[in-house]
């Protein structure tokens, strides 16, 4: 039995990056941003890392807590960097460790973009 709690998809204080796909066609800029986000999550290791951070107790995870995804530590660091570049994660160095959080607007944006089909 899992002790994971569901993550909220919509936060009233967050403005999503793009409109729902069913509302209107995306602009070129919106499409580039959205594609980068979903492309980063298209890799199974990155998706597992993103999920590990998003579901970690307290909403953040130390890199030392999320390295067990079947690849070496340098590869984990590479994938975390790609998730940051796509705007999906933020990080903060505390002493010798780096802590990662899901960017607050990410889950809201994903749910918003998918619109009525997200339910």
Image (cartoon, rainbow, N blue to C red):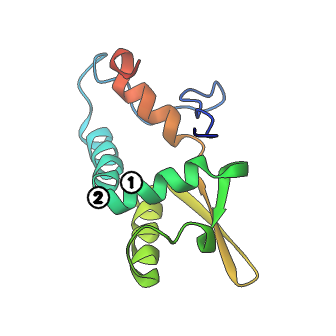
The reply to whether dot 1 and dot 2 touch (C-beta < 8 Å) is: yes
Residue at image location 53% in from the left, 55% down from the top: 52
Against 35, residue 95 (above or below) is below
Residue at image location 43% in from the left, 84% down from the top: 74
Q: Which mark is residue 86?
A: none
Q: Position of residue 79 (x, y in %)?
A: 40, 69
Against 34, residue 13 (above or below) is above
Residue at image location 26% in from the left, 30% down from the top: 26
Q: Secondary structure at mark 1?
A: helix
Q: Position of residue 111 (x, y in %)?
A: 44, 28
Q: Secondary structure at mark 2?
A: loop
Quadrant for the C terminus in the image: top left
Which residue position is annotated with label 2? Answer: 43
Q: Nearer the viewer, residue 105 or 3?
A: 3
Q: Position of residue 60 (x, y in %)?
A: 66, 56
Q: Is residue 103 visible?
A: no
Q: Is residue 8 visible?
A: yes
Left or right placement of residue 14 versus residue 24 in this view = right
């Amino acid at each position: 039995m899992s002790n994971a709690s569901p993550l909220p998809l919509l936060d009233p204080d967050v403005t999503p990056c793009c409109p729902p796909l069913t509302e209107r066609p995306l602009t070129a800029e919106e499409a580039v941003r959205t594609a980068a986000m979903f492309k980063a999550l298209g890799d199974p290791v990155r998706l597992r890392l993103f999920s590990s951070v998003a579901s970690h107790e307290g909403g953040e995870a130390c890199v030392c807590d999320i390295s067990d995804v079947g690849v070496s530590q340098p590869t984990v660091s590479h994938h975390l960097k790609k998730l940051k570049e796509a705007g999906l994660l933020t990080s903060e160095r505390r002493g010798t460790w780096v802590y990662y959080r899901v960017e607050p607007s990410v889950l809201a944006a994903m749910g918003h973009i998918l619109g009525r089909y997200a339910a």
